[in-house]
Image (spheres, coloured by chain):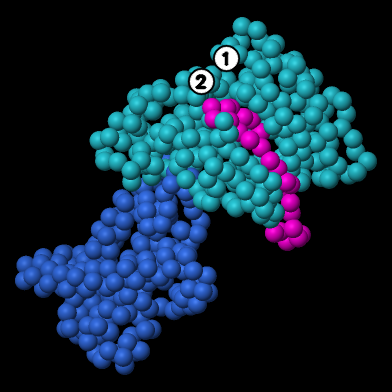
């Protein structure tokens, strides 16, 4: 069953240099309960597509349908978690988690729900802390609880763990997987970290360099829970994705630096397998 | 100590250079016969009225300027230009408009506080991290709720700073106004002291004015500090 249907969507922006095509014609179908990762070089339109689905921006052409209805505006059925977490510093932890529930239910009920989700991310003890008192990983947890408390039908995550250290990120990956497999939550996850994508996703969509479009789609057929008993399982997937990505990254480089410069084999994209398992 | 020594040396006569003891006595007398209390009461009630008007008007104008481009271009830039005008310069105009009465003084007080409040509200709202608004949108919060629950709290630290500055301007404007056009209040007591050649009273009233100013300033600083603690924008929390 199709949950989210993106049909011939394009997005252009007006800039001082003229029209910029952020997203070339793109069509994708997302099924309910799927975990889909978007990967691609910077400026490939993956965040643009996420914003379109969130309703934060409008497509230039094409349609986005959620459960058959067209997406016109942002709504709490499609909550976004931003890299900056966007937690409100004037509220404490539990008030942040309750934020989206305030207009929907009375105080006692929403406090109960907020506590349930703080329990889920193991931060019950910190419900009265202010945001600046938390570490990066704790902020990510609060942002996750705040989004899940709204019971979104699609959870949109825009490089949510990019600012975290590798250990913290690894722990959060595990917890996110646990939560998602328990709740069958549909998740669209933007990242530039290939290992992260392979570890989390049911399906990885690879974007081309500007103008962005979907270049390849790679299903990750690995049963869950994906623990680290066999730490080498992602390697073939990572190789495959990096091969696809390499060409796009070179394209971006050619536009950003001198034309005669080429990417040496060992630069930037290390062969997959090295330091594997340390970060994912 | 130096003050006492200089006054005792008798270089200047006491009606030009009062001793600390004389000033203290003037303070005690002033509070005993309640003239200082009435003066403070009159001045404080005036500034509270004028400042409340400034807050309401300034907040509304600042909000409108941040929301609508044409308000920003008209009112916003006008306010910015008139900010350099000491507000007591409005008094002649106010007297012609309203006559020689309290309304004229209130007008000067309002004009004193208004610019900083308008500018702080406008800038505060404009400089909110856009991601807060996006986050609120994606959680289904919009319209009046968005202003009440996200935009105003996010802009509050900047607005409070503007309010504090506005208060200082309002207090100065009021004192200037009371000096020039007298009926009651602390500025009036200053003028009375001058006319009676009572330098001790003049200095005593000045001390009262400073104290009232500091007390209110402390109140704003406390508020600011609480916000900073919450936001984590102060070191050594």
Q: Characterize the local packing of mark 1: few (<14), some (14-19) or many (20 or more) Cα atoms within 10 angstroms.
A: few
Q: Which residues are magenta?
A: A14-38
Q: Is residue B108 left or right of residue A190?
A: left
Q: Dot 2 lies on which element?
A: helix
Q: Residue furthest left?
A: B33
User: Which residue in the protein does label 1 denote?
Assistant: A224
Q: Quadrant of the C terminus of chain B?
A: top left
Magenta run includes residue A34: yes
Chain letter, blue: B
Q: Kindly tell me whether residue A178 is visible in this rendering.
A: yes
Q: Is residue A103 above or below residue A108?
A: below
Vertical relation: B174 (above or below) A194 = below
**Vertical comparison of A195 with A5: above or below:** above
Q: Residue B25 vs residue A9: left or right?
A: left
Q: Is residue A266 above or below residue B182?
A: above
Asked if the residue under mark 1 is in contact with the one under mark 2, i.e. CB atoms within 8 Å, the reply is: yes
Instruction: Identify the residue at image location x=66%, y=54%.
Output: A60
Q: Chain of mark 2?
A: A
Position of residue B22 measured from the top left corner of the image (x, y, whole percent) = 16, 68
The numbered mark at residue A181 is 2
Magenta stretch encompasses residue A183:
no
On the image, the x and y values in percent for residue B15 come to: 20, 78
Return the x and y of residue A74 as percentages of the image width and height: 50, 48
Instruction: Please name whichever residue, B137 or B3, is drawn nearer the observer in this view of the structure.
Output: B137
Which tint is chain A? cyan
- Image disc number at residue A134: none
Chain of residue at mark 1: A
In the figure, is residue A249 to the left or right of B171? right
């Amino acid at each position: 069953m199709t949950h989210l249907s993106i049909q011939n969507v394009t997005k252009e922006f007006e800039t001082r240099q003229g029209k910029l095509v952020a997203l070339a014609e793109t069509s994708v179908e997302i099924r309910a309960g799927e975990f889909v990762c978007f990967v691609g070089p910077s400026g490939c339109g993956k965040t643009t597509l996420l914003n379109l689905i969130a309703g934060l921006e409008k497509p230039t052409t094409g349609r986005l349908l959620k459960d058959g209805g067209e997406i016109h505006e942002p709504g709490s059925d499609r909550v976004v978690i931003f890299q900056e977490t966007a937690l409100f510093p004037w509220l404490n932890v539990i008030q942040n988690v309750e934020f989206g529930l305030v207009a929907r239910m009375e105080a006692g009920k929403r406090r109960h729900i907020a506590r349930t989700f703080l329990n889920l991310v193991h931060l019950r003890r910190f419900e009265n802390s202010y945001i600046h008192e938390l570490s990066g990983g704790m902020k990510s947890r609060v942002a996750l609880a705040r989004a899940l408390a709204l019971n979104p039908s699609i959870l949109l995550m825009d490089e949510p763990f990019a600012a975290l250290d590798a250990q913290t990120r690894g722990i959060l990956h595990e917890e996110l997987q646990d939560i998602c497999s328990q709740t069958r939550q549909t998740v669209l996850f933007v990242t530039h970290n290939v290992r992260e994508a392979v570890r989390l996703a049911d399906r990885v969509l690879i974007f081309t360099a500007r103008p962005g479009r979907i270049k390849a789609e790679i299903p990750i057929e690995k049963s869950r829970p994906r623990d680290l008993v066999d730490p080498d399982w992602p390697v073939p997937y990572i190789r495959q994705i990096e091969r696809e990505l390499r060409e796009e990254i070179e394209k971006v480089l050619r536009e950003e630096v001198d034309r005669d410069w080429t990417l040496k084999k060992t630069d930037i994209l290390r062969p997959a397998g090295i330091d594997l398992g340390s970060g994912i | 100590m130096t003050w006492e020594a200089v006054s005792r040396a008798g270089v200047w006569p006491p009606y030009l250079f009062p001793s600390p003891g004389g000033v203290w006595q003037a303070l005690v007398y002033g509070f005993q016969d309640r003239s200082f209390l009435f003066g403070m009461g009159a001045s404080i009630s005036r500034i509270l009225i004028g400042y409340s008007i400034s807050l309401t008007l300034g907040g509304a104008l600042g909000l409108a300027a941040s929301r609508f481009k044409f308000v920003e271009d008209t009112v916003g830039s006008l306010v910015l230009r008139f900010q350099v005008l000491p507000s007591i310069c409005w008094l002649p105009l106010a007297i012609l408009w309203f006559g020689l009465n309290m309304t004229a003084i209130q007008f000067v007080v309002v004009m004193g506080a208004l610019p900083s409040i308008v500018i702080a509200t406008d800038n505060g709202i404009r400089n909110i991290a856009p991601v807060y608004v996006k986050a609120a949108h994606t959680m289904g919060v919009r319209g009046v709720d968005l202003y009440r629950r996200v935009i105003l709290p996010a802009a509050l630290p900047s607005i409070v700073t503007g309010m504090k500055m506005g208060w200082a301007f309002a207090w100065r404007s009021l004192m200037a106004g009371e000096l020039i056009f007298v009926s009651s209040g602390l500025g009036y007591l200053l003028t009375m002291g001058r006319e009676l050649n009572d330098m001790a009273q003049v200095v005593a009233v000045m001390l009262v004015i400073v104290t009232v100013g500091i007390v209110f300033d402390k109140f704003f600083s406390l508020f600011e500090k609480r916000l900073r603690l919450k936001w984590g924008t102060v070191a050594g929390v």
